[in-house]
Image (tube, helix red, strand yellow):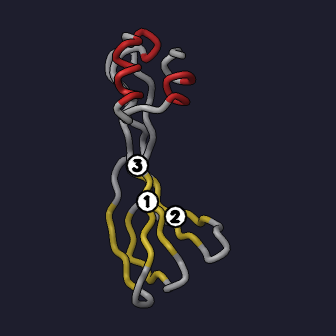
Amino acid sequence: MKVEFESIVGDFQLGYISHGQSPKKGVGSGLSGGAVSQFRKTPQGALGPLPTCTQEIIKQDENVVSISCKGGGFENRLERDPSIVANDVSTGLDSIVSAKSLRGCW
């Protein structure tokens, strides 16, 4: 999950401890997931990495982008029942792009 924080009242002090630099493994034959990361975003849109544990002053015209870790899923994604994938797409839990590229459906 990606979240972007911005100030609405001026500079602010941000402190955090982040855990999860190593990508998480999926269960069974699931794929590896992603690791956490944090960035300072400049007014021009450039991203500069932030440490896993820090206390920073974030200027009003800067943002902080935080990406949380995610798991790699359960079992082989290509063996998922196509009717379940279709239901996930129709209810908005999955996209057609994901169903095509990650699940082999459509």
In the rendered view, tell whether residue 1 sits above or below residue 8: above
Q: In this figure, which residue is indicated by the disc labeled 2? A: 39
Q: Amino acid at mark 3?
A: Met
Mark 3 against mark 1, which lies toward the viewer?
Answer: 3
Q: How many marks?
A: 3
- CB contact under 8 Å: marks 1 and 2: yes
Mark 1 lies on a secondary structure that is strand
Residue 93: numbered disc: none
Sequence-first tag of 3 and 1:
3
In the rendered view, tell whether residue 58 sits above or below residue 91: below
Q: Amino acid at mark 2?
A: Phe
Q: In this figure, which residue is indicated by the disc labeled 3? A: 1
Q: Residues within 10 Å of mark 1 (few under 14, many from 20)?
A: some
Q: Residue at x 43, y 34 (%)?
A: 33
Q: Residues within 10 Å of mark 2 (few under 14, many from 20)?
A: some
As rendered, which of 2 and 96 lies closer to the eye? 96
Q: Within the image, what quadrant is residue 57 found in?
A: bottom left
Residue 66: numbered disc: 1
Q: CA distance from mark 3 to mark 1?
A: 8 Å
Q: In this image, 14 relative to 44: left or right?
A: left
Q: Within the image, what quadrant is residue 100 found in?
A: top right
In the rendered view, tell whether residue 58 sits above or below residue 68: below
Mark 2 lies on a secondary structure that is strand
Q: Within the image, what quadrant is residue 3 found in?
A: bottom left
Sequence-first tag of 1 and 2:
2
As rendered, which of 76 and 57 lies closer to the eye? 76
Q: CA distance from mark 2 to mark 3?
A: 14 Å
Q: Residue at x 62, y 77 (%)?
A: 43
Q: Residue at x 34, y 17 (%)?
A: 84
Mark 2 against mark 3, which lies toward the viewer?
Answer: 3
Sequence-first tag of 2 and 3:
3
